[in-house]
């Protein structure tokens, strides 16, 4: 990776982390207040964060679709399109449960590591353990599956 790409990546990460911090997405109590629609103590301000993200993302996606290649790389590195299946739905449900129980999302958790919040450290540790266990289980299934 050349130095220009590294600087752009660093600046993008700093901008993202700063946005998460300024918006309150690093505060588990605020996130849980946003997710709690039933108690009468709903905290709707994070709707503005989501709306702001859409205002930035939608034009950027439209621009990306019109470009033949990115400015600082030879090609776009987009994830493959996969069908919605049981594994995807289960993963999405687990993600939502984790977010709803802890009030922490993986992106803000990584950005919040520097804040010294014990709950964030515990969440990131559990997230890493979950990723390792998933990868080991996936590797076992792939080696145990018969070759066609």
Image (cartoon, rainbow, N blue to C red):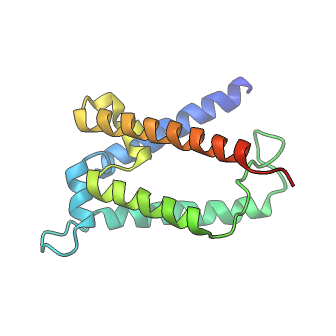
Residue found at the far top of this picture: 3
Residue 92 x %, y %: 48, 62
Out of 136 and 26, give the one closest to the viewer: 136
Residue found at the far right of this picture: 148
Drawn side of residue 54 relative to residue 80, left or right: left
Question: Which residue shows up at 22% across the image and 68% down it?
Answer: 36
Drawn side of residue 127 relative to residue 37, left or right: right
Residue 35's quadrant in the figure?
bottom left
Question: Which residue shows up at 47% across the image and 41% down it?
Answer: 15
Residue found at the far left of this picture: 40
Residue 1 x %, y %: 73, 27
Residue 28 x %, y %: 25, 49
Establish if 86 lies above or below 146: below
Establish if 69 lies above or below 132: below
Residue 117 x %, y %: 24, 33
Quadrant where the C terminus sits is bottom right
Question: Which residue shows up at 28% across the image and 31% down it?
Answer: 115
Q: How many marks?
A: 0
Establish if 112 lies above or below 89: above
Question: Which residue shows up at 33% across the image and 43% down it?
Answer: 21
């Amino acid at each position: 990776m050349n130095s220009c790409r590294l600087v752009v990546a660093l600046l993008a990460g700093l901008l993202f982390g700063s946005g998460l911090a300024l918006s309150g997405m690093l505060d588990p109590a605020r996130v849980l207040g946003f997710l709690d629609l039933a108690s009468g103590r709903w905290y709707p301000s994070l709707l503005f964060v989501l709306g702001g993200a859409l205002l930035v993302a939608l034009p950027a996606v439209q621009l990306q679709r019109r470009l033949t290649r990115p400015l600082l790389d030879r090609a776009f590195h987009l994830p493959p399109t996969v069908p919605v299946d049981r594994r995807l739905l289960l993963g999405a449900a687990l993600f939502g449960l984790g977010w709803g129980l802890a009030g922490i999302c993986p992106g803000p958790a990584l950005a919040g590591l520097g804040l010294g919040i014990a709950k964030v450290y515990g969440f990131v540790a559990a997230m890493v353990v979950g990723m390792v266990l998933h990868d080991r289980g996936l590797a076992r299934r792939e080696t145990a599956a018969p070759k066609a």
